[in-house]
Amino acid sequence: MTKITTREILNTTEHRPWNVPEENWSFYQEWSDAIFLHYKVDINELKKFVPEALEIDLFDGIPWVSVVAFTMKKIRPKYVPAFSPISNFHEINVRTYVKSNNKCGVYFLSIEAGSSLSCKIAKGISELPYRYSKIKRTNNTYISQNSTYHDTLNLHYNVGKEQKEKTELDIWLTDRYALFQDTENFINAFEIHHLEWPINNIELRYINVNYPRFKNLVHNKPNTTHYSKGVQVISWGKKKMEK
């Protein structure tokens, strides 16, 4: 990932579907070496996991769920330096695509992190559904286990060539600038900003995706896949919306 300044990130907005928020941003983070597994799913099955206050987004009439395994780096508040034991960790999210207030974003069915302390802090600040899993990563493997939910992710892969041109589906699945998450009484909305994801092809030499709660959504045969070196991300504080 070629690093640029936060000012350069904020000034690069041509790819966004709406304007960057006017208020000061709250957090900086880097989402690095990301593996995307994308699945076409049945909308009635997906509705079991998405709050009614959010509209499920569709591409050509079809909903999608994605498993995204990456490494979080340098996450920090705006005026605070990153602290490696908290700021750097491996993360997996299972997400789908939703709409709210005319903005297209993501909704997390699950978020795992490989640091129990980082999970506690992130969940306390953001109210996102973080939970701890044992995660190990090498240059060509990504392996996770969660004993509470009996979740397993085991990927052996080779990174291919960069995609010079992206399809509409590539963009729809990756470039999202809002996320929405439910709590007991509210939907929390977060604005984010980053440059467009650079995308490479990826060869999966071995794949074992086993999430019992989502067995009808994610499995060992994704419909499409991506790899990305990553993006630098700026995010704003949460805004609460009535359900």
Image (cartoon, helix red, strand yellow):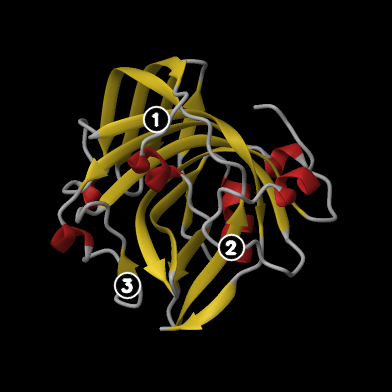
- Pair 3/2: label in front: 2
Q: Which residue is mark 3?
A: 51
- Measuring from the top left, give residue 156's x and y in whole percent: 37, 18
Q: Which residue is mark 1?
A: 226
**Which residue is at a point 76% across and 44% down the rendered structure image?**
8
Q: Is residue 165 above or below residue 28?
A: above
Q: Quadrant of residue 27?
A: bottom right
Q: Choose the circle earlier in sequence order: 3 or 1.
A: 3
Instruction: Between residue 35 and residue 142, name the one nearer to us.
Output: 35
**Which residue is at a point 59% across and 62% down the rendered structure image?**
191
- Badge 3 amino acid: Pro
- Measuring from the top left, give residue 143's x and y in whole percent: 41, 27
Q: Which residue is mark 2?
A: 191
Instruction: Between residue 231 and residue 186, name the one nearer to us.
Output: 231
Considering the image in quadrants, where does the C terminus appear? bottom left
Q: Choose the circle earlier in sequence order: 2 or 1.
A: 2
Residue 146 visible in the picture: no
